[in-house]
Image: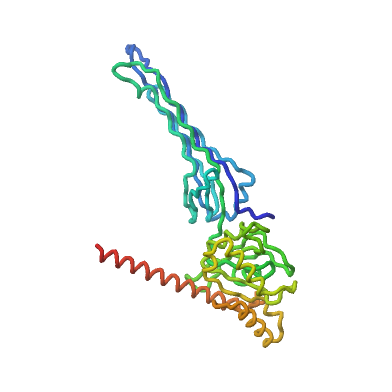
Amino acid sequence: MKFVDEATIRVMAGDGGSGCVSFRREKFIPFGGPDGGDGGNGGSVWLVADEGLNTLIDFRHQRAFKAPRGQGGMGSQMYGKGGDDIEVRVPVGTMVTNVDTDEVIGDLTANGMRMKVAQGGRGGLGNIHFKSSVNRAPRKMTPGTPGEVRELKLELRLLADVGLLGFPNAGKSTFIRAVSAATPRVADYPFTTLHPNLGVVRIGIDQSFVIADIPGIIEGAAEGAGLGIQFLRHVSRTSLLLHMVDIAPMDGSDPVEQVRAIEQELEKFDEELMSRPRWLVINKSDVYSDQDELHEVANSIVARLGWTQPWFLVSAAGGEGTREVCIQIQQFFDVEKAEARERAEAMDDVRMRGE
């Protein structure tokens, strides 16, 4: 199965209905004058964020969306009926870009958020609008204006608090199974998860965070190698990164080199990602029976990396150490929220003094 987190669609708003040329014709009123009504407006196209959707895969089957046109005006000053707007449901976290101009139109970041992406055409004027002292019987009307037509690029970026990074088979999927109710596929051989998995980690009452298992990133991802940029985009929304590395990769590669390789891809994609909080999680501690040897190897990895941020030693398969990692993450977010409240209160104080 291919994870679809990008799609290109065509949205077509409805054209406005044309105005009407009509004259009042009633018994005993031979010169009733113009009474042609206006045309109705065309329907617009809206995108609506729906938390029930988690991929853009449905747009593989339907790529064109057209709103109905407005009805033409009629006699007796009757206006044409407007075309109904249509709504296109997209996952929360969808960014919308105009393909022709490369302009980012908007970002649907909350459930129920709506964005108009194609404006319906305006209805034309009936001949009632063109009556004057010198033209008592105008035969003029205006056609409706065409509705907007746009090619849109949709990009889904996960809305998660924590992003799990690491080479294929580093144990990310196993970790997310251990700490949440998510059930991603796991196996004992290297493969790349084909779609991100989200899990909610609950620490206590009103204490929880969302963690995303970002599929394995390989060298060259920033240039599009493998699934490349598709998944690097998801990392950009997370507040905290967990960089997971296998303490003893099956292929005999160096864990330090694996960490540095992904660091290079993050920096190439967006330098700001390198300044984001990123904690190291050394996984598969269960492969060592000798605890002294285990800690010697782990400390060596940390020392060679020159790691200064928090780091942890866990066994995701057995659950050892995973709870401690989650508690530390929750404390990190608790501090962030407290600081945000203090900043907001300080700004309120400044505004009140200014008043």
Q: Which residue is drawn at 47% across and 49% down?
A: 114
Between 192 and 34, the one nearer to me in the picture = 192
Is 320 placed left or right of 69 in the picture? right
Instruction: Relative to 340, say whether 140 is above or below.
Output: above
Between 155 and 129, the one nearer to me in the picture = 155
Is 164 placed left or right of 28 in the picture? right
Q: Where is residue 267 in the image (x, y as percent from the top left)?
A: 57, 65
How many numbered marks have been drawn onto this rendered protein structure? 0
Q: Which residue is drawn at 60% across and 43% down?
A: 63
The quadrant of the picture occupied by the N terminus is bottom right
Between 332 and 30, the one nearer to me in the picture = 332
Q: Where is residue 326 in the image (x, y as percent from the top left)?
A: 55, 74
Q: Which colour scheme is used?
A: rainbow
Q: Where is residue 27 in the image (x, y as percent from the top left)?
A: 35, 12
Instruction: Relative to 167, say whether 320 is above or below.
Output: below
Instruction: Relative to 66, say whether 217 is above or below.
Output: below
Q: Which residue is drawn at 69% across and 69% down?
A: 169
Q: Where is residue 134 in the image (x, y as percent from the top left)?
A: 30, 16
> Quarter-wise, where is residue 78 in the image?
top left
The quadrant of the picture occupied by the C terminus is bottom left
Instruction: Relative to 161, say whether 64 is above or below.
Output: above
The residue lying furthest to the left in this view is 355
> Quarter-wise, where is residue 285 in the image?
bottom right
